Amino acid sequence: MGTDLWVDRERAIWKVLPLRPQPQPFESITSYIIRLAEANGLQSINELGTLAGGMIFSDLKNPDYPAAAYPGLAQITGYPEERWFDMTFFHLLQHFGYAMNRYSLHRFFQGSLASSLRYCPLCLAAHAPAYYSLLWRFLVLPGCIEHGVRFLDQCGHCGSPLPLLKCLPQLTKCLTCQGDLRTCESPRLDDDDVERTDRRTNDLKMLLTPRPRPLEKEEAKLIGKRYQLLRQQRGLWIPEVAHLLGRDTSVVRDIDYVRRFRQASLHDYIRYADILGYSQCEIFDEPSLQDLVAPFSEEQLLDQVETAIHQLKVRGKPILPGSVGDLVGMTGSRLKQYPRVKKLLNRYEAQRKQEIVQFDIKQEEELFKQVEHILKQLEACEEPIVLQHVCDLVGLSYSWIVKKYPRIRALFHEWQKSRSGGGLSPRLNEEAKVQQVQAAINVLVSHGEAVTLRRIRQIVRLTQKQLRSSPRVKALLAHYTKKWQREAS
Ligand SMILES: [Zn+2]
Ligand SMILES: [Zn+2]
């Protein structure tokens, strides 16, 4: 065992490359691999891979993603594995509490990364040694703030796209035309883009740098809390943010509360911060995050709930525990576990119920007067009164009125009773019956309602027997009865 270890170490010493250039700030691992091979006069980067214990770099599907380990590369360079992580998106992922799980990484980076080389020719020309920056891969960054130019995403000489990791270790040459990438011309950044480029550069540099304090298990939750708080301060609802992002509300909820199966991408995080008017540097502001570490005191929560209530009032929305919870980032029932918050919410709920009752009473009162007036008018004109018709005149359906307004229902009953002479249905002559039934059918048809016996009876207030005993009414209804039978069969 001891001997094996010694042999391993012996071999390791022999494997160390003679030239080991220093990695540059924010240099990508792909860039460093090319430089390492180039510096040591290797013909291809796969040759370097063989030396590193059989890594096949040209097969690398996701360049610059953090891999599980870099023992081979650590061995041939003598640089510890941690330094290799610095050349990947490792720290950025850590900021968002992401594990190095490939599936979720794809989702997280969706739409954020360039799949071929984007570069600043002036950086390649000015920096010695020349290297590729991790920053260049982020599509959200329009160009280079140092030189004030837009990034190029192809060879400036022949227009060919440039692979991130080329087999031949030539960092500054186009493999297609052999042109020198350092002499390519790139357009200047627009004035509008300069500020954005500056902010994005600072944000990405911060995200690609290790966190200043030891990592927290619940890192993403803390960031989520920060987003929540800033969203509340802006007076924005989750659905409003989702609408502005053009994404599902579940994505915003994922950022705010951190779901088990995460859905939000880096792009979502950045755009959400844009909507709030904050840079990533401001979101990840260390003292602000520290303030969030301690659980909410009831006092703080009460403040937040009061703010949420104010926001709901401004929008003219009902103050319900659920909608308050949506703004505060808790479920309504969870909110009610805090006694003082519960008391406040209950007060609003009681107030709301009271308002509804009062509103209904007021509405019924007005409606009652209207209906009474119409009935009197119709009676004065000695017109045949069809209750459905009265309902039409007030703009509500008969069934709705009867269900919703007991006083009006009583008025109808009273009225029907007085007209039908002591509760019995009126004895009508054949002609009157036909006329009433025809009127009822007209009302139903004009409403697009189904002509059924039940509805006709409700309107004309005749018994089934009275309806059936009249041959002319039967004939009138036969047309519809046949239709029912057809539809039923
Ligand atoms: Zn540059
Ligand atoms: Zn070219």
Image (tube, helix red, strand yellow):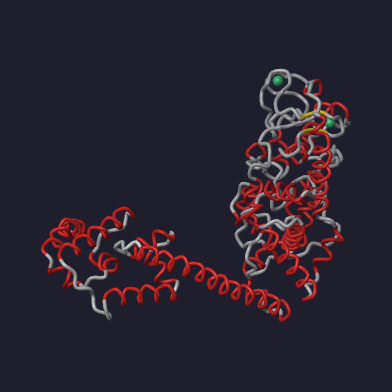
> Horizontal and vertical percent for residue 207?
79, 49
- State the image quarter where residue 325 is shown: bottom right
- Of residues 74 and 258, the one nearer the viewer is 258
Residue 71 shows up from this direction: no
- Of residues 71 and 391, the one nearer the viewer is 391
Residue drawn at 23 percent across, 75 percent down: 425
- Of residues 278 and 163, the one nearer the viewer is 278
Is 44 left or right of 355, judged from the image as shown? right
Is 376 left or right of 100, judged from the image as shown? left
Residue 276 shows up from this direction: yes
| Residue 97 higher or lower than 13, as above or below | below
What is the residue that sits farthest to the left in this orientation?
Answer: 471
- State the image quarter where residue 396 is shown: bottom left
| Residue 336 higher or lower than 194, as above or below | below
The mark tally for this picture is 0
> Horizontal and vertical percent for residue 177?
70, 18
Is 428 left or right of 364, judged from the image as shown? left
> Horizontal and vertical percent for residue 485?
17, 59
- State the image quarter where residue 225 is shown: bottom right
Ligand 2 occupies quarter: top right
> Horizontal and vertical percent for residue 489?
17, 59
Q: Quadrant of the N terminus?
A: bottom right
| Residue 85 higher or lower than 292, as above or below | above
| Residue 329 higher or lower than 151, as above or below | below
